[in-house]
């Protein structure tokens, strides 16, 4: 993306000089050709080479999420301002009085007790906890019960909010229980954006609780033995695993795979919604990557593989999501 | 132990935020002392030896519309807390457009200073930002380490030039050497000297003025032109100057020859004292 973006780096200059922009594919030389037709007959041609890759489609459906929140991007943008820039994760939930609460999420160290044993030099080293509480009236839609809370990556959230704010679009957050992915959608006449973020599967009953002063009901707990997502990456065949390694943003491709076994302590469970039962292929599976620590940073979107190793290509694979191909 | 305070006035809030920003620049970790009439930010680096100390005092009634505190006991009616200064200034930063600010001592799994800000909002609903700043309560037996430092008998007392000018001079000098000589006399002259094998740079400030001497002051017998000099680590002086965003109401420099530089500032009603020991 960096090369593509560098073509459009200076918006001011583009607005002043560019009359037309043509984007085409040159199959022979495997290039994406971006031609800027500028004033005075100047033509700038950029050739960006590309590689064919597996088309992975994320499988998710906002409609299957029971809870939804919608607000103008500006409200949400202002809501995340008080949080320190370095904060990795934030918990979003509904508190008492139907107030929407955003709270900084601190990972407990493994083995730490709550309340932590006070030590002589410990307390000041702990990070500051910040919480933002917004009234229901600021939201265009709020369909979620009091007490529900999900934790997701703040950095990604800030990224999508800054885009939404610049385009002045309302943001809808579709979510389910903690552990299920949260889908952030933006819509306008020109575009349709879906951002799927993983949410923390919270095994500790206290960690995601938004504080007894705010909620009168603790966050509903997932049972420790709940069925791990069958569409979990670790379950997929080795091909999709290799593909994920190539498409993952972070170089730590291996760490992105969560282990299937539920380790004590918070753990990421990333999986787009349940899709076809052909994905229940744990018997073909090499097994969870042993010793993988729960990934602390979730950088890539998770894709369900549409390849099925058991019934290896015998007919067209079922299409689980339409290619979004240029309309809207 | 209890502490609750509230600020409703925007000017007071801004002033308090500025004080907190200054403290954050001067000391990474500092001690906050809460007593019925005052708030103190204290840095006491005696343990490290050769470290700087800081004592900042403000009258609580100049800032807070409500202030209630209950110390450790009736005889020891004070609370000593250690916190990371940056946390407080960061929490106050979100209070720029606040209707009210409340601070209280809480215990949420561990002792915290909870700063709760009600923001002005365009819409009907109010927005509340809460920050829990973790802190450490300092036990009574250590309180003696955090008392107001005694103001030493200075050889020379002189008013400082405009701090911004001083800062830019000191910043440039730091590039040459870390060893700075500060000298001043009772004729209102202050010199900053840097010396290396290759170069010697002196900046002269004149007509600064000296505060009036007390009648029994030993310095009365001193030759006004005689310079008192202190050798300090320039970085310590620079850190002090970096914390001064606004020009103070009054800025005094007291030199104890070869021992210490004592900087005494007054920002409106907040007094700040900073002690830089001489290089050994």
Image (tube, coloured by chain):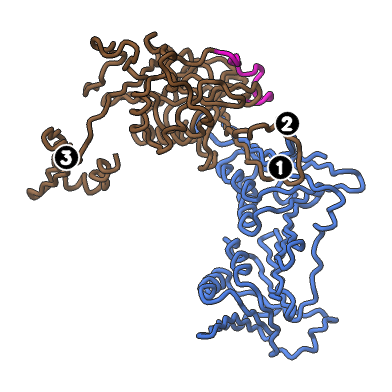
In the image, which residues are magenta? A210-226
Pick the quarter of the image with the N terminus of chain B: top right
SS under mark 2 = loop
Contact between marks 2 and 1 (CB within 8 A): the answer is no
Of the two numbered discs 2 and 3 on the same chain, state the one appearing first in sequence: 3
Answer whether residue B117 is magenta in the image.
Answer: no
Seen from the viewer's position, the closer of residues A57 and B140 is: A57
Tell me whether marks 3 and 1 sit on the same chain. yes
SS under mark 3 = strand
SS under mark 1 = helix
Chain B: colour as depicted:
blue
Residue A115, numbered label: 2
Q: Is residue B61 left or right of residue B75?
A: left
Residue A48: image location, x then y, percent: 20, 41
Neighbor class of circle 3 (other Cα within 10 Å; few <14, some 14-19, many 20+) is some
Pick the quarter of the image with the C terminus of chain B: bottom right
The answer to whether residue A322 is above or below residue B166 is: above
Q: Chain of mark 1?
A: A
Answer whether residue A213 is magenta in the image.
Answer: yes
Residue sitting at x 77%, y 88%: B222
The answer to whether residue A141 is above or below residue B87 is: above
Residue A123, numbered label: 1
Seen from the viewer's position, the closer of residues B178 and B269 is: B178
Chain A: colour as depicted:
brown
Q: Label 2, label 1: how many angstroms apart (C-alpha)?
A: 12 Å
The answer to whether residue A161 is above or below residue A273 is: below
Tell me whether marks 2 and 1 sit on the same chain. yes
- For the stretch drawn in magenta, the main secondary structure is loop
What residue is disc 3 on? A34
Q: Count the labels in the image.
A: 3
């Amino acid at each position: 993306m960096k090369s593509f973006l560098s073509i459009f780096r200076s918006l001011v200059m583009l607005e002043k000089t560019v009359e037309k922009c043509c984007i085409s594919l040159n199959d022979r030389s495997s290039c994406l050709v971006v031609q800027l037709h500028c004033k005075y007959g100047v033509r700038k041609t950029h050739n960006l080479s590309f590689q064919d890759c597996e088309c992975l489609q994320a499988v998710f459906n906002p409609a299957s999420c029971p809870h939804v929140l919608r607000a103008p991007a500006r409200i949400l943008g202002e809501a995340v301002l008080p949080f320190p820039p370095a904060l990795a994760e934030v918990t979003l939930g509904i508190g008492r009085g139907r107030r929407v609460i955003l709270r900084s999420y601190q990972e407990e160290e493994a083995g730490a007790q709550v309340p932590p044993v006070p030590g002589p030099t410990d307390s000041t080293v702990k990070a500051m906890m910040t919480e933002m509480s917004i009234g229901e009236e600021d939201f265009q839609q709020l369909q979620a019960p009091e007490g529900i809370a999900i934790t997701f990556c703040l950095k990604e959230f800030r990224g999508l909010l800054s885009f939404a704010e610049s385009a002045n679009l309302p943001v809808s957050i579709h979510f389910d229980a903690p552990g299920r992915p949260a889908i952030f959608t933006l819509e306008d006449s020109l575009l349709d954006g879906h951002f799927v973020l993983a949410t923390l599967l919270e095994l500790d009953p206290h960690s995601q609780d938004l504080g007894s002063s705010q909620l009168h009901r603790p966050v509903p707990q997932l049972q420790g033995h709940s069925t791990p997502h069958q569409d979990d990456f670790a379950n997929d065949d080795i091909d999709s695993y290799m593909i994920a390694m190539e498409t993952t943003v972070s170089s730590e491709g291996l760490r992105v795979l969560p282990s299937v076994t539920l380790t004590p302590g918070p753990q990421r469970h990333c999986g787009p919604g349940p899709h076809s039962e052909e994905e229940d292929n744990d018997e073909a599976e090499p097994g969870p990557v042993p010793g993988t620590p729960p990934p602390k940073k979730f950088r890539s979107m998770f894709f369900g593989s549409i390849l099925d190793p058991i019934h290896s290509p015998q007919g067209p694979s079922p299409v689980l999501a339409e290619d979004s191909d240029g309309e809207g | 132990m209890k502490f609750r305070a509230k600020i409703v006035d925007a000017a007071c809030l801004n002033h308090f935020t500025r004080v907190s920003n200054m403290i954050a620049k001067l000391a990474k970790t500092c001690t906050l002392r809460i007593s019925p009439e005052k708030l103190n930010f204290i840095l006491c680096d005696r343990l490290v030896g050769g470290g700087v100390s800081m004592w900042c005092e403000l009258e609580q009634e100049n800032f807070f519309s409500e202030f209630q505190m209950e110390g450790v006991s009736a005889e020891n009616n004070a609370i000593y807390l250690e916190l990371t200064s940056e946390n407080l200034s960061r929490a106050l930063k979100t209070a720029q457009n606040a209707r009210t600010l409340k601070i209280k001592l809480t215990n949420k799994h561990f002792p915290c200073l909870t700063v709760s800000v009600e923001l002005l909002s365009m819409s009907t609903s109010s927005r509340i930002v809460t920050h829990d700043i973790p802190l450490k309560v300092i036990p009574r037996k250590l309180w003696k380490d955090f008392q107001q430092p005694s103001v030493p008998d200075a050889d020379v007392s002189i008013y400082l030039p405009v701090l911004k000018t001083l800062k830019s001079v000191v910043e440039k000098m730091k590039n040459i050497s870390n060893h700075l000589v500060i000298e001043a006399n009772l004729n209102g002259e202050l010199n900053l000297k840097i010396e290396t094998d290759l170069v010697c740079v002196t900046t002269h400030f004149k007509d600064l003025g000296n505060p009036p001497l007390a009648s029994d002051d030993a310095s009365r017998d001193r030759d006004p032109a005689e310079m008192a000099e202190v050798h300090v680590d320039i970085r310590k002086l620079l850190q002090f100057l970096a914390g001064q965003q606004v020009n103070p109401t009054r800025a005094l420099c007291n030199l104890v020859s070869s021992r210490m530089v004592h900087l005494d500032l007054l920002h409106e009603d907040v007094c700040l004292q900073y002690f830089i020991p001489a290089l050994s």
